[in-house]
Amino acid sequence: MSAGTDEVVVTGLGATTPLGGDVATFWTALLEGRSGVAALTEDWAADLKVRIAARMSVDPSEQLTRVQARRLDRAQQAAIVAAREAWADAGFTGRAAENDLDPVRVAVVIGTGIGGVTSLINQHDVMLEKGPGRVSPLLIPMDMPNGPAAHVGLAVGAGGGVFTPVSACASGAEAIAYGLDLLDLDRVDVVVVGGTEACIHPLTITGFAQMQAMSTRNDDPQRASRPFDKGRDGFVLGEGSGVLVLERASSAAARGRTPYAVLAGAAVTSDSYDIVAPDPEGGGQKRAASTALKRSGLDAADVVHVNAHATSTPTGDGAEARWIADLLGEQTVVSATKSMTGHLLGAAGAIEAIATVLAVQNDVVPPTINLDDPDDLRVDVPDKAREMPVPAALNDSFGFGGHNAALLFRKA
């Protein structure tokens, strides 16, 4: 719960994902149980061990001017597209000062796991093939991980700080938790938060494949991502961005904005267990969730739904399902939306936070697809969208390095 009595609320949502280039399309596709995973048909994929991925359904470069798109890495493009939608959805136009906002009271926190890695790799190829003189002078601003946050900060005129959590697959959720802290500490009045990632490239795919972390169901792409299923064999790489606008309930009311939900609690922990493997007991994950719950002031019985991290890896899914049952009860309704979107790495927590917010607002939870043979689950994982009262819901995100982030949303 906020340090004071003024709750932190979500007033804007924006997304570009494998299921849609905006929030409405993304949400509709989630509830319908569609898959955004497809075969990679490019020549460069022909000899790869993994030849599937979940690309953004709408190319972000098509939503920007040609000049702007050429100056941005794909992850930056996605962040700009999502941020524009969220900013407008919150009722803002132009930069902060044009909305009677004090720019030094507006901040941006956009996380990413890898940043502009494809721009770096592509320009390295240019150097090898054509020489150093042909390398783009825009390489460094396109490559730097803080680039997406910086560009969003420029777009909204944020003078209260621009921050970039880089915590692997927990980055997007950690950015949202950071935004809650900024508001609770009265550092700012409005925060644009979220995550972005776009690293579908032969080198990154090969790196994950060499770790044996990815599904190799190349002949059945739409059924490859199968969290909680006994036949799961790894995650599917996705790309996109999710952005939320956070502010205090009093400022939202003063502007006549109806919030989507309250961000009632958040917490970040670490495992100190292994650089890539999660703690098999899920101790750090459970501690993040229980801390977020305590901060919210809610009872465990109030949290009826969890949008799980559930990447479709053999070791990760089971531990998460067990501690959810232990902490919240075996009746908890759990969704693994990566079954449809694939794993967006640093953007995953952000788009899944949006799904969690909409579940709370609309009293309906998304399904988990491809769950043919559940793996001894002690929680309720529906394979179809379920209408039910959702007074509060939890969103989990975990990342290589032992990063854990938990976000707790409740009805406004």
Image (tube, helix red, strand yellow):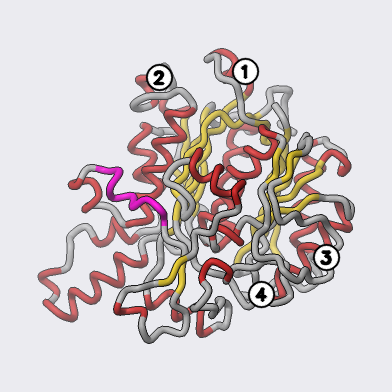
Kindly report the distance in space between the C-alpha atoms of the residues bearing marks 1 and 3: 42 Å
Q: Quadrant of the C terminus?
A: top right
**Magenta stretch in the rendered image:** 56-64
Identify the residue at horizontal 60%, vertical 60% (top origin): 338
Residue type (three-letter) at the residue carrying disc 1: Ser
Foreground residue among 174 and 196: 196
Kindly report the distance in space between the C-alpha atoms of the residues bearing marks 4 and 1: 46 Å
Q: Which residue is mark 4?
A: 232
Identify the residue at horizontal 55%, vertical 43% (top origin): 28
Residue type (three-letter) at the residue carrying disc 3: Leu
Say which quarter of the image contains residue 199: bottom left
Q: In x, y percent, where is residue 58?
A: 37, 50
401 displayed left or right of 228? left
Identify the residue at horizontal 36%, vertical 59% (top origin): 144
Residue 212 appears anywhere in the view: yes
Kindly report the distance in space between the C-alpha atoms of the residues bearing marks 1 and 2: 16 Å
Identify the residue at horizontal 46%, vertical 68% (top origin): 53
Task: Say which element carries label 2.
Answer: helix
Q: Which residue is mark 3?
A: 377
Q: In x, y percent, where is residue 212?
A: 57, 83
Task: Say which element carries label 1.
Answer: helix
Mark in front: 3 vs 2: 3
- Establish if 258 lies above or below 246: above
**Which of the labelled discs sits on residue 262, or is there none?**
none
Mark in front: 4 vs 1: 4
| Cβ atoms at labels 3 and 4 below 8 Å apart | no
Residue type (three-letter) at the residue carrying disc 2: Asn
Q: Which residue is mark 1?
A: 250
Mark in front: 1 vs 3: 3
Residue 268 appears anywhere in the view: no
Q: Is residue 130 magenta?
A: no
Dot placed on the residue nearer the N-terminal end, 1 or 2: 2
